[in-house]
């Protein structure tokens, strides 16, 4: 989405505004969005009260009102299901007959398939399954989007427009969503872990935690921005920093000996196996 674009969206209901749905909701409050209404539900009144302070958000809790989820979806064109995967079936049964014809139900629940959603919702409701990541809160998300069997092109476009307000969108077959989740879904955690470890190394070299944070976070931010704006392949940018027989070349050699590619292969395979376990209800 361009910086000066205004995106207009219909009434949106967030059912469960936890870490992921909450990040999307917060991202939607950035300038450049016009929505007919944003509703959000949480289990506890305390969480609902916190969300109620956000501009344009109607916040409800099932603790205070057992019918809060049904109230939130009434008249909503987009319903974002953000509860924990194990809670999804009961939630869908609860709201099924409160959804109006033409509603687009958007899942951000990891591992829960389109088939599960469609089996529990009426035929006049379409389903779009997505896999966003937490940088949505700063408008830098990467979201995978897959249409369901009842989704029209317009339904898919509406879901895409929702997530384009908080970052980039990839439309993929549902079969690829779990693999996507191991890269962009879990990816922020990988980056934070790398920053954490390099910061610890900087501290071991005698820098204060504040100095280490400035160096490491600034370097990651700067390198990412350079990559985004240069249009160059990361290998080419790495080559430009790596002078022959220099210090960086020696460090890269150590990293190559550590077999980082194989390590990432193993890590993503572990994440993919867990995603399949979640899909199977494990």
Image: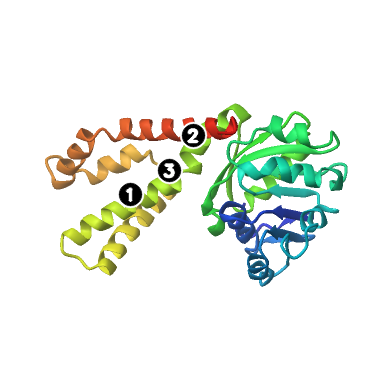
Tell me which label, 3 or 1, sits earlier in the chain: 1
Residue 121 location in percent, x, y?
79, 37
> For mark 3, what is the residue?
231
Tell me which label, 2 or 1, sits earlier in the chain: 1
Tell me which label, 2 or 3, sits earlier in the chain: 3
* Mark nearer the viewer, 3 or 1: 1
Q: Specify whether residue 180 is in view.
A: yes
> Going by the picture, which residue comes out furthest to the bottom?
53
Residue 228 location in percent, x, y?
44, 48
> For mark 2, what is the residue?
274
* Mark nearer the viewer, 2 or 3: 2
The residue located at (72%, 36%) in the rendering is 117
The residue located at (62%, 42%) in the rendering is 86
Quarter of image, res 153: top right
Please, what secondary structure does the residue beneath circle 1 have?
helix
Q: Nearer the viewer, residue 95 or 103?
A: 95
Q: Nearer the viewer, residue 83 or 168?
A: 83
Please, what secondary structure does the residue beneath circle 3 have?
loop
Q: In the rendered image, which quarter contains the C terminus?
A: top right
| Lateral position of residue 1 relative to residue 100, left or right | left
The residue located at (84%, 36%) in the rendering is 122
> For mark 1, what is the residue?
194
The residue located at (58%, 52%) in the rendering is 20
**How far separated are the C-alphas under marks 2 and 1?**
22 Å
Pointer 2 local density, CA inside 10 Å: few below 14, some 14–19, many at least 20: some
Please, what secondary structure does the residue beneath circle 2 have?
helix
2 and 1 marks in contact (CB < 8 Å): no
Is residue 256 depicted above or below 209 in this figure?
Answer: above
Residue 271 location in percent, x, y?
45, 35
């Amino acid at each position: 989405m361009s910086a000066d674009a205004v995106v207009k969206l219909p009434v949106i209901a967030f059912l469960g505004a936890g870490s992921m749905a909450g990040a999307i909701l917060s991202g939607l409050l950035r300038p450049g969005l016009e929505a007919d209404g944003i509703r959000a539900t949480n289990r506890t009144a305390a969480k609902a009260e916190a969300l109620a302070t956000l501009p344009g958000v109607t916040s409800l809790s099932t603790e205070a009102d057992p019918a809060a989820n049904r109230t939130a979806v009434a008249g909503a064109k987009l319903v974002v299901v953000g509860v924990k995967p194990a809670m999804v079936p009961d939630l869908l049964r609860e709201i099924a007959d409160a959804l109006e014809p033409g509603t687009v139900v958007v899942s951000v629940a990891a591992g829960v398939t389109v088939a599960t959603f469609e089996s529990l919702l009426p035929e006049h409701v379409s389903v779009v399954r997505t896999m966003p990541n937490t940088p949505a809160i700063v408008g830098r998300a990467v979201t995978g989007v897959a249409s369901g069997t009842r989704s029209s092109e317009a339904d898919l476009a509406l879901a895409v427009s929702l997530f384009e307000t908080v970052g980039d969108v990839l439309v993929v077959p549902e079969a690829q969503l779990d693999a996507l989740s191991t890269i962009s879904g879990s990816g922020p955690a990988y980056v934070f872990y790398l920053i954490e470890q390099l910061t610890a190394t900087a501290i071991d070299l005698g820098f204060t935690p504040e100095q280490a944070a400035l160096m490491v976070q600034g370097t990651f931010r700067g390198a990412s921005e350079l990559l985004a704006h240069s249009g160059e392949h990361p290998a080419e940018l790495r080559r430009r920093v790596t002078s022959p027989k220099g210090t960086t070349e020696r460090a890269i050699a150590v990293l190559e000996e550590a077999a980082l590619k194989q390590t990432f292969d193993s890590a993503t395979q572990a994440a993919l196996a867990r995603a399949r376990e979640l899909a199977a209800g494990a």
